[in-house]
Image (cartoon, rainbow, N blue to C red):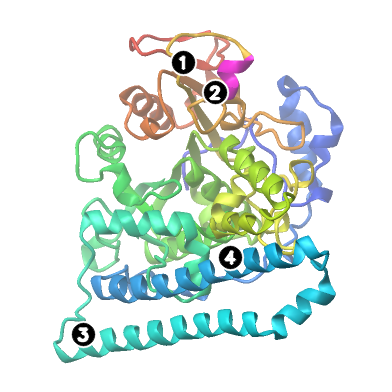
Amino acid sequence: MPNVDKTYPLLAIDNDDRLDPLAKSGYPPDNVEVELYEALAELDDLDDSTLGDIDEQNLLPLAAREPVTIADAMDGVTKLATMGVVEITDIVEAMHREILLRPLGRFTPKHLNRWQRGLTARIYGSVRQTANFVGDHLANGLNIYHSIVNQNNRQPLPRRLKLLVKVLNGVMGDHLVTHDNPLAVPMMLYDRFGQVPTCQRRDCLSGRVVILCHGLCMSHLSWHPNKKIGLGFKLETSLPDTTVLYLDYNSGRRISINGRDLSFLLDDLLKNHPNISQIDLVGHSMGGLVARSALFYGTVQRLDWIDRVGNLVTLGSPHHGASLERIGHFVQDIISKLPFAGSLAKLGDLRSAGIIDLRHGSVRDEDWQSLDGRDVLPQAFRHPARLPFHVRGYLVAATLVEGHYDSKATSLLGDGLVNIASALGEDSDTHTLLVPEQHKAIFYGVSHYNLLYNDRVHQQIIQWLIANGQDAFAQSPQLCVHSYPNDLSVVI
């Protein structure tokens, strides 16, 4: 078990709207301890009826999962090109149909049905069938070629090609899964040598394990696991008996689906390595949301790994949404209402479901399962997902402004992608992440991407993880940490 103080007044479990007595009690944050544990005592059971389907691929044992190889990439690119031709054909046909029918006042369901039976629609259908025919036979030809020349030997992707594949997964990863494209990467854990952790003889993991979770369009390589500048290397150097593992996943899938898969992956890890005493999660951007979702679903399903979790650290995670996705959705909505341009809005549907989830920081299935199409519930209707009460939460925000300038513009600017309030989990009473102020930090002069590599950020994370909850007993009051580019960190 991790060194977790059960009397530490932190976070409430909120797994269903009916399990949220704290949000309705109106208690002040300073008096959370008594009310928190009185409320938790009333929680008899957790509702797991809304978990939905689980990706069976990611429920395979760790040893059975295989990363994308060169042969997979060649096959996947062929299928991706075919899918691109089909998607573009759909958009062109939609524009053609609208341009012809709308001026005549025939852009109605009746005439749209007639269009589907007409000659023009059949021509577009032939283009799609031809693209699929050529793509399928080309893919089959490549598979035969690899079999004949014996090149299908599971050669791993080189680093640069892997980074490109991860960008494709972030942009359209859910489409890759839907079309069974081998470019869709499975969720896996790697050590700093790029190996999957196994438990054979002396290779079993023990002690403390820190899981680093990358963000959108990134990979486990984004942490620079083999370099001294990487956070993982610094953590293993600073924390005795600690192993750092790197999560790799398809960031284009729904955050809640990735969260549930991560929950089962960590449960599988603990079963294979029972001597692990504590698990800490560190997530950058989307990775922080995936980690939160995993904690939520692991708690709902009462999985054993949840009891081993000590800390969660998020770096620039859009807990309450990312401005860029909101702007993109707003523009798409405007275009969809413009005459003769509405069909162009279909281009927006090509972006991944993972990106759509970033609009409001949705980490639960209920935020999208009941909707038609690829969308999420409005911010006011999304479901809360607080952390388990025993998990210590640490939230890092950044701003491009180099000096402390307390203004609304500075907060909204944030790190360029996520504003300060969202990164610090500050929202309405129902959705605010209840972490102590001393567990929050704002880094000035740091961009969203550089949160991965900034030395000041690294040192703060190491300081928090070394303390491992002992800062709860500090005598002097502590507030949010403010760190400036001159390396002088002060508390405001």
The kind of residue on which mark 1 rests is: Val
Q: Distance from label 2 to label 1 (Cα)?
A: 8 Å
Q: Earlier in the sequence, mark 2 or mark 1?
A: 1
Q: Position of residue 156 (x, y in %)?
A: 22, 67
Q: Which residue is mark 3?
A: 146
Q: What is the distance, in whole Å, between disc 3 and disc 1 at their CAs?
A: 53 Å
Query: For the residues marked 2 and 4, what is the alpha-carbon distance in whole angstroms?
Result: 35 Å
SS class of the residue under badge 3? Answer: helix
CA–CA distance in space, label 4 to label 1: 41 Å
Q: Which residues are magenta?
A: 408-412
CB under 8 Å between discs 2 and 1: yes
Mark 4 sits on what residue?
A: 91
Front tag of 4 and 1: 4
Q: Earlier in the sequence, mark 3 or mark 1?
A: 3
Count of number-bearing discs: 4
At label 3, which amino acid type do we have? His
| Mark closer to the chain start, 2 or 4 | 4
Reading the chain from its start, which is encountered first: label 3 or label 4?
A: 4
